[in-house]
Amino acid sequence: MTAADEAEVVAEGQVVEAVPKRAMTLGTGTSIAVLVVLLAIPLFAKNFIIFQMTMLLIYGIAVLALNILTGGSGQFSLGQSAFYAVGAYTSAILMEQFNVNYALTLPVAGIICFAAGFLFGQPALRLSGVYLALATFALATAMPQLLKLGYFEHWTGGVQGLVVTKPDAPEILQNALKAFSLKISQDMWLYYFTLVITVAIYLWSVNLLRSRSGRAFMSIRDNEIAASSMGVNVALYKTLAFGVSAGITGVSGGLGAIAVQFVAPDSYTITFAISLFLGMVVGGVGWLPGSFVGAAFIIFVPNISESISKGLSGAVFGVLLFLVIFLVPHGARQIAIVGQQLAGRFRR
Amino acid sequence: MRSCQLHAVALAAAVFALSSSAALAQKKYDTGASDAEIKIGNIMPYSGPASAYGVIGKTEQAYFNKINAEGGINGRKIKFISYDDGYSPPKAVEQARKLVESDEVLLIFNSLGTPSNSAIEKYMNARKVPQLFVATGATKWNDPKDFPWTMGWQPSYQSEAHIYAKYLIKEKPDGKIAVLYQNDDFGKDYLKGLKDGLGEKASMIIAEESYEATEPSIDGHVVKLRAAGADVFISITTPKFAAQAIKKLAEIDWHPLHIVSNVSASVGGVMQPAGYENAQGLLSAAYAKDGADPQWDSDPGMRKFFEFLAKYYPDANKLDGSLVYGYGVAQTLVQVLKQCGDDLTRENVMKQAASLKDFETDTLLPGVRINTSPTDFAPISQLKMMRFKGEKWDLFGEIISADLSN
């Protein structure tokens, strides 16, 4: 065995690879370019495409939340669908049963999910690695059943789910646009609404990971014993990471309910949790912008594989996924790095 | 030279405009229909937990291939665009929007699953695009007042349960009923129908057990229900669990009056795997013929069905009940489109779908007819009771109608 091989074995022992925090984000120039593109898309696209882009942002937020947990603090979760469901149901119930404005339901969904995640983080503390993944897996499997329970049926609509009304753009904006004889469709409004929230969450997450708490997360990820001997409260920060991740997932769940206009237990099965996990890996664990690339993967690649073969769409999807993991094991981050290097060489 | 060409083009354009405006006088089209073709959208779970039902979509595709090969409907070919939603409601919304806004279909036909259809119902009605003959037995699809663009096809679970309730009140008025049901919309809708049907005799139900579709085995539930002392066992289960229950009953030597829901009445899919000897005397109700049942081998309708399979879907498994379903529902759509004539607007499609009179498909039981009206959006609401004997179902009694509306 050569030294290089040995080094590889050692690296494999670590569950999540150490990602330096600077490598977690995009450069300012690139970020602004991406934002401009995102702002411009609805002006040229059909409503259906706008809807898909909205879903991309929403799933992107959910993957981002998982990325903070796994890429940031090194903990696994297959239970994100459960928090997403809680967020979605919180928004849906508040909107439909209590007539709360849709925008106000999102912070509530976030807070409830933060609390749920924080509480779930307590017992999960004692578990690590695959065991934690299993515990969260249990949460994801239980959630659809809990939502069907008779006790909550009055609010949740039971197995039939709840239909949510899609919001119009605020009247002030509509009137302002009318002055220029422009109109804003529900889809377009929802897209911009989601985009604003996405940008806010993204910036907040980047800052979080750059802050003292973020450093604590990463030190726990890289080496728990070293972290605790440096004075990091491991228990607190681990549960905190769970709470933050769940809270953000809850907000995206709420947005998802508004965009899809429907919540039902069957929307939030374990398959969805695995999709989010997949999105994270494809986007690059620990690379926040990759979350949105991952979200694009879980939305568009099933459609592509379906267009290749209807009967074997699952198998085609598997092959595509395998190719991605095999060719670019670090996901979109790897492509971005290569792109950056090429650009750098070009400049010289 | 150039002006000559221009003239020719202008002339051609004028002729075209004239001829098409003349044609427009009689023909009316909405998005998705033209002189040459009619675009039909469809959403099926080709992947995911309900992927067994994907056969329905494939049968429909095969049936439309047959229609096209025979010249289409009033000269128009059917273009059938079917997408996978993996039985996930958010994905169904995405696919429905893709069909309506990007593929620009005339209507969405036979999309499968209660959750998926619930998710797109509001959108379809807001857009005024027909959501025709949805593939679910939930009772809520018969609601023309609130959802005039949505229509079911098969008998609703509740109306089927009503029929069993009627039968039990008549034949076994002092029965003690145990119910095993799947904990989802199907099971709950059914249970509600049963209770409504029993009315004040609902106390006949002495035990209820629910199971999750993800459980590996339901043996424990069956044993529990037996311990409750019931002498009627109603199994509101999907095929896999229905077969398990039939086997388990034989194993523990419990012989109550056993009713299985129509969903699981397939000879090939349930009775054969459960063992014919265990299934003797079982009761159920049906509205369509069973492709695996030899009593229909010489039936003219079923002969046509088998010919269709041989020619257009040769690798199909004939025991699969989804084939009969897909064939029947596709035939109903073709009838609606025929009735539309040259007025292929969405409004007229719904109008024609709501005016089917005594229509019979090749696969419906003799005597069962499809009837709709502007206030009745439940095309099939008749069933016949049947008892399992030997290796097939024996139909008995009258055709029972159980029309229900919201």
Image (cartoon, coloured by chain):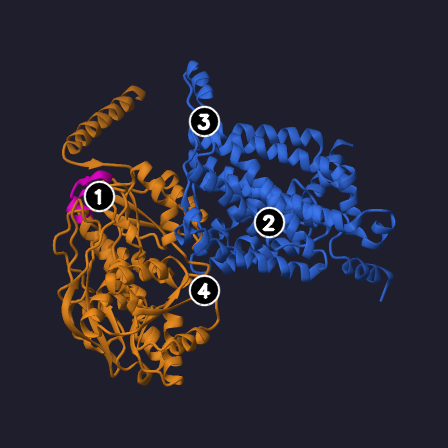
What secondary structure prevails in the magenta region?
Answer: helix
Q: Quadrant of the C terminus of chain A?
A: top right
**Which residue is identified by label 4?**
B212
Q: Disc 2 to disc 4, how far (Cα)? A: 28 Å
**Horizontally, is A30 left or right of B272 in the view?**
right
Q: Earlier in the sequence, mark 4 or mark 1?
A: 4
The type of residue carrying mark 2 is Gly
Comparing labels 3 and 4, the label whose residue is closer to the camera: 4
Q: Is residue B342 magenta?
A: yes
**Which residue is identified by label 1?**
B350
Compared to residue A6, the image places residue B240 above or below, namely below
Nearest the eye: B127 or A230:
A230
Q: Disc 1 to disc 2, how far (Cα)? A: 41 Å
Tell me where the magenta segment starts and ends, as one range.
Answer: B337-353
Return the x and y of residue B77 as percentages of the image width and height.
25, 48
**Which residue is identified by label 2?**
A279
Q: Say whether mark 3 and mark 1 are on the same chain.
A: no
**Which residue is identified by label 3?**
A169
Chain letter for blue, please: A
The type of residue carrying mark 4 is Glu
Q: Secondary structure at mark 4?
A: loop
The type of residue carrying mark 1 is Met
Nearest the eye: B356 or A111:
A111
The reply to whether residue A45 is in sight is no
Q: Mark 1, residues whose alpha carbon is within 10 Å: few (<14), some, or many (≥20)? A: many
Q: Disc 3 to disc 4, how far (Cα)? A: 41 Å
Q: Disc 3 to disc 2, how far (Cα)? A: 31 Å
